[in-house]
Image (cartoon, rainbow, N blue to C red):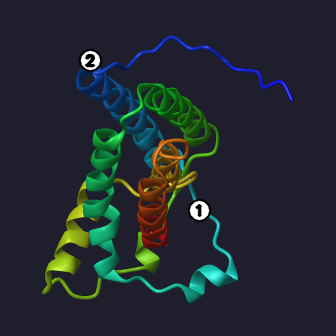
Amino acid sequence: MNKTRFNFRQILNRDNKYYRIGLLFSYFFILYSVTSWYGNKWGVVLPFLEIDGLIDLYPSSIWVYSVLYPIYICWCFYSYDNMIEMNKIAYSFISLTTVSSLIFLIYPTVFPRELFPVADDSNLSTKLLSFVRSTDKPSNCFPSLHVGYCYLFALGFLNTDKLKLYISLFIATLISVSTL
C-alpha cells in the first residue's frame, strides 16, 4: 500500500521551538479573543439536551479545567523529542485553531451560566471557579478547544512514546470530563 506523505516546511526546530511556540499561542489568543468578543455579543445559547440537565456543576472540577490544562499543554510541548512529530502537531494546532475560529464566527455559542450558579464562595474551588467565570466570557463553547487541544497534543506521542501517549490520553480525558 502506497502512503501519500505531505512534506511541510519544518517551522519548529530545537533552536527556535520556544519562540515559535509563543507565536503559535499568540495566534490562538488573537483569534480566540476576537471570536469570543463576537460570540459574546451575538452568540446563541448552546442547545441543551435532556441529558445535560442530569450533569451537575462540580466546582472542584475547575482545578482540572483551568490548572491541569495549561500544565498538561506545557508538559506535552516540553516532552516532544521528535521534531517531525512536533511540527505535525504545530500544523494541526494552526488548523484546529483556524477551523474552530471559523465555526465560532459562523455559529457563535454561549453557555448559559445562569443555569449553573456557583452556590458558595467560601472554599478555594468556588473562588477559583468564580474568578474564571469573571475573566473568561461564556462564549466559544462549540467546539471545545479544551477537548480538541488535549487530544491533539496527546497524538504527538502516537508514533514515539506509548507511555506518554497513555498518560496524555488519560489527562486529556480528565480535562474533557471537567468541561461538562
Q: Nearer the viewer, residue 5 or 108?
A: 5
Quadrant hosting residue 96: top right
Residue 149 horizontal side relative to residue 75, left or right: right
Q: Which-is-in-front pick, marks 2 and 1? A: 2
Q: Nearer the viewer, residue 60 or 152?
A: 152
Residue annotated with mark 1: 46
Residue 96 horizontal side relative to residue 57, left or right: right
Image quadrant in which the N terminus is located:
top right
Which residue is rendered at x = 52% and y = 29% of the image? 88
Q: Amino acid at mark 2?
A: Asn
Residue 131 horizontal side relative to residue 156, left or right: left
Residue annotated with mark 2: 16
Q: Amino acid at mark 1?
A: Leu
| Placement of 66 over or under 29, stated as above or below | below
Element at badge 2?
A: loop
Residue 122 horizontal side relative to residue 169, left or right: left
Quadrant hosting residue 78: top left
Which residue is rendered at x = 78% and y = 25% of the image? 3
Which residue is rendered at x = 42% and y = 43% of the image? 36
**Residue 63, labelled with which disc?**
none
Q: Nearer the viewer, residue 56 or 150?
A: 150
